[in-house]
Image (cartoon, grey):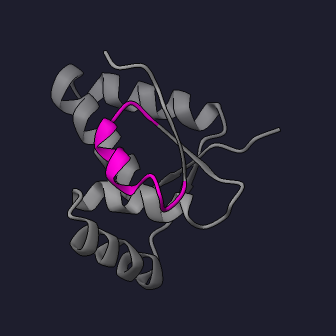
């Protein structure tokens, strides 16, 4: 069975988007639901932050996105699943599966 992981940086991004769109209560419910689905939040170490910073600067992608690709690069078994087609600029760094556009 596959394990779903998310960088703590993306976790914060999900939380802020949900709070902005739907309010604090909806944000808390969504995050609780994600934890219940066994989504594992991966802490950001200094080493991960440095690697993400290099990707951010070298590949000119948003800082938060650089943490997602850095996590995907951690293992050849990892797959980054996204609907954000800006990740096509770093598709050579890790396995990426693109969800259909909205």
Q: Is residue 26 above or below residue 76?
A: above
Q: Is residue 22 above or below residue 96?
A: above
Nearer to the camera, 16 or 47: 47
Kindly identify the residue that appears in the image at 36 percent across and 45 percent down.
Answer: 88
Observer able to see residue 10: yes
Observer able to see residue 8: no
Residue 33: % across, % down: 54, 27
Work out which quarter of the rendered image holds the C terminus and state it.
top left
Residue 94: % across, % down: 54, 57
Q: Is residue 36 above or below residue 79?
A: above
| The magenta stretch spans residue 90 | yes
Residue that lies at the very extreme toward the left in this rendered image: 20
Kindly identify the residue that appears in the image at 48 percent across and 62 percent down.
Answer: 93
Residue that lies at the very extreme toward the top in this rendered image: 102
Quarter of the image for residue 56 reads bottom left
Work out which quarter of the rendered image holds the N terminus and state it.
top right
Residue 64: % across, % down: 29, 57
Kindly identify the residue that appears in the image at 33 percent across and 36 percent down.
Answer: 84
Residue 53: % across, % down: 29, 75
| Residue bounds of the magenta highlight | 82-94
On the rendered structure, is 21 left or right of 39?
Answer: left
Quarter of the image for residue 69 reads bottom left
């Amino acid at each position: 069975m596959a394990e779903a992981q998310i960088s703590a940086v993306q976790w914060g991004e999900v939380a802020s988007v949900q709070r902005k769109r739907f309010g604090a209560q909806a944000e808390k419910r969504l995050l609780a639901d994600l934890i219940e689905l066994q989504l594992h939040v991966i802490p950001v170490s200094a080493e991960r932050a440095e690697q993400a910073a290099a990707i951010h600067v070298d590949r000119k992608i948003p800082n938060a996105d650089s943490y997602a690709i850095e996590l995907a690069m951690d293992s050849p078994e990892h797959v980054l699943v996204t609907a954000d087609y800006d990740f096509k600029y770093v598709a050579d760094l890790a396995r990426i599966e693109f969800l259909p556009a909205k």
